[in-house]
Image: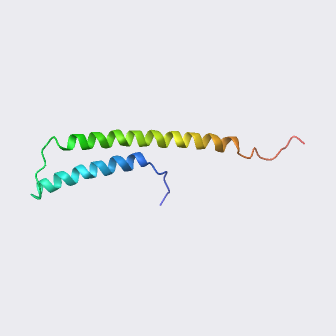
Amino acid sequence: MLRHEFQPGKLVAGLFLAAAGVLYAGDAGGLWVTEWFAVIPLVTFGLVLAGVVAGVNGAIRRRRGAGRRNTADPGPDISG
């Protein structure tokens, strides 16, 4: 299996959407009653939080990437 880069924004969005699915599944199973509008703030907050997390993650990766490029070995000196 190929390795992929970790994206915490997608993880946060997935967790909040899964929580919304659990709320509706519990309502459908008769365990509790969930109003139709109760999931809107949950999903909205989850997507906003996921966007913030993705932005912070991108900023951290850009900052770390710039530092790595500056300290990289330029390779062998072939000028003589």
Between residues 72 and 53, which one lies in front from this camera angle? 53
Residue visible at 49% across and 51% down in the picture: 5
Picture coordinates of residue 34, whole percent (x, y): 13, 49
Quadrant of the image containing the C terminus: top right
Residue visible at 47% across and 51% down in the picture: 6
Does 55 sit left or right of 42 as displayed?
Answer: right
Does 69 sit left or right of 60 as displayed?
Answer: right
Q: What colour scheme was applied to this rendering of the protein?
A: rainbow
Does 21 sit left or right of 78 as displayed?
Answer: left
Picture coordinates of residue 60, whole percent (x, y): 53, 42
38 to 32, vertically: above or below: above
Number of marks present in the image shown: 0
Between residues 1 and 25, which one lies in front from this camera angle? 25
Extreme-bottom residue of the structure: 1
Does 65 sit left or right of 56 as displayed?
Answer: right
Extreme-right residue of the structure: 80
Picture coordinates of residue 72, whole percent (x, y): 70, 45
Between residues 26 and 72, which one lies in front from this camera angle? 26
Residue visible at 42% across and 43% down in the picture: 53
Picture coordinates of residue 73, whole percent (x, y): 74, 47
Residue 68, image quadrant: top right
Residue visible at 43% across and 42% down in the picture: 54
